[in-house]
Image (cartoon, rainbow, N blue to C red):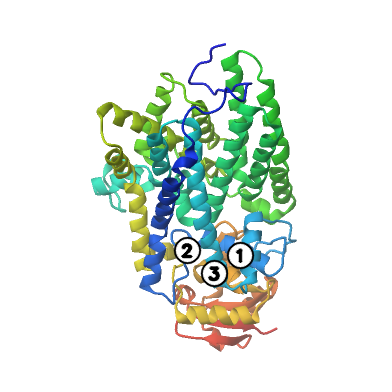
Amino acid sequence: MRQHPAKLKTSPDPAAAAPAHPDVLQDFRWAALAAAAIVALSCAPYLFGWLLRPSDYMWHVYNADDANVHLSWMRQAAEGRWLFTDRFTSEPQQPQFTHLLFLLLGKIAGIFGGSYHALIAVYHLARVVSAWVLLVLVYVLAGCIYPDRETRRLALLAVGLSSGVGWWLRGLLGVSDGPGGGALAELLRTLPVWPEATTFLSLYIYPLFTVSLALLVGAYLLLLRAFETGSVKTAAGAGILALLLGQIHSYDIIPFYGVLAVAVAALGIARRAVPWREAGLAAVVVALSLPAPLYQYLVFHANPVFRQKALIPTPTPAPAHYLLTYGFVLLLAIAGAARLRRGGHRHAGFLVVWAVVTLAATYLPFSFQRKMVEGAHIPLAILAASAWAALGRRWGVPSAAWAAALVLLTIPSNLGIMANSAHRLVDNNAIGVAQQLPPYYLDEGERGALDRLKEAGRPEDVVLCFPVVGNYMPPYCGVTAYASHWAETINLGTKWRQVHEFLQSYVSDNWRRDFLRDQRIRFVFIGHVERALGNFDPARAHYLKPLFTSESASLYEVVP
């Protein structure tokens, strides 16, 4: 039966499914070098940050607070633990949660001593390596769909470098952070920096994103191969990768299952018959991967601390934000999808299913809506590359010049975000610190206080602090910070108010002692922020013993 070329295609005959285009491995050297160049670009702001203040740099850009959560899990693994607790909140907990990626990275860092510097070095090494693997896998995926080298190469560049038009329009229109400028200016001001939505931003900041994206692309590659050949072993391979994906980044498994279901349904519609073979192979993938989300579900519902964290909303912005988030990529992707009706490409219809289902999943009624967008940029960028390649062939533009034009058209917002990172490195994240986010540099006094805390503290010891420096305490010192993270700290608003009240001079010492005892606080940290928010002098409190004092930070131990 003749099948519509825009639909997913599969053949019961493995020989008939064999690709008619050159082997993508022939071009591997180019792909490897291009991927390495993109990863190197993502490292440039880190190098800039180190050059500014080498001894003070903590090796973060963008959100140091979430990276420190990952590092705190790694530290627990380096300490010899296999199950983790949340050290950004003071509530008593049973260790029930584990994370395979950071468990592995922490064990590796533990071999090198498990210090903060060992943790951050292994962390970024994992980011760099997995980012490179991800981009090479994207190139292989594009080669499985489009036979021509030009489209494959454009696909890698589009996935690795393209972005939306939010920052581009802000610069073009001169939109400032202040009020005014109309509805478009307000929309641009409220446009979130959405790292999960864009591949470059994902590989720019966290190995969590790059590893999960590599697993996602690998699982889809094996799934498509299983659909072609009918191989249960290949489907089992896809299921194992999906199992790891569900354990490492559980949010991705929901749209992943949705893509599987819609892909099988699309095959049934194209054939006008139930695709029993593909349905069975998809069932193998689901059966092997299902233990991961079930485990996460049980942990988050059995553990009240993790349950409260899971309920913190990260909502998806209005659909109009997608137009800005993806910009020209989205428009070109629509053109690329429309072209599928003119000529058949193996599995090109799968890209449409992947993109549409993933974007639709971000509006499902879950508290973590926004996080499910991860991976949507990849099929959009590949489809966009196919449309751009076709347009270049029609106009007769040289391939190199046409590829450069695509990069110049779609990279500006990524460059804008990197420039913003550089600005924040220069002023040590002043905007973020004003919002109780951690700085990118800790001076000698702050590091000295943390070093002393690392010597004196134990994992169960609670430290009174604000999140600015307190966010570094769990990964750097291995202790528990009382109020240190917007999502990881339970009842953060209440704890902020309590810490603020503790720092006021009008509060009685009896109240402070009772508070410290009731909250099981063993150490009190006083830094720039704590001094600015209250005039309490801990040096005069007989129930606080100084362990470390400096101009910028001091550490006290509570005397029973």
Q: Amino acid at mark 2?
A: Leu
- Count of numbered marks: 3
Would you say the residues marked 3 and 1 are in contact, meaning their CB atoms lie under 8 Å apart? no
- Mark with earlier residue (3, 2): 2
Give residue 449's quadrant in the image: bottom right
Q: CA distance from mark 1 to mark 2?
A: 16 Å
Question: Is 254 in front, or is 214?
Answer: 214
Residue that carries the numbered disc 3 in the rendered image: 472
**Residue corresponding to mark 2:** 437
Looking at the image, which residue is at 40% across and 49% down? 34
- Please name which of the two marks, 1 or 2, marks the residue nearer to the observer: 1
Whether residue 316 is visible: no
Q: Categorize mark 2 by other alpha carbons within 10 Å: few (<14), some (14-19), many (20+).
A: many
Q: Left or right of 53: which side holds 462?
A: right
Q: CA distance from mark 3 to mark 1?
A: 9 Å
- Residue 157 vertical position relative to residue 231 in the rendered view, above or below: below
Q: Is residue 488 above or below residue 323?
A: below
Identify which amino acid the numbered label 1 is placed on: Ser
Question: Where does label 1 land, which residue?
Answer: 72
Label 1 crowd (10 A; few <14 / some 14-19 / many >=20): many
Q: Is residue 268 above or below residue 403?
A: above
Q: Say which quarter of the image contains residue 107.
A: bottom right
In front: label 3 or label 1: 1
Instruction: First in sequence, mark 1 or 2: give its number.
Output: 1
Residue 415's x, y, as percent?
A: 34, 52
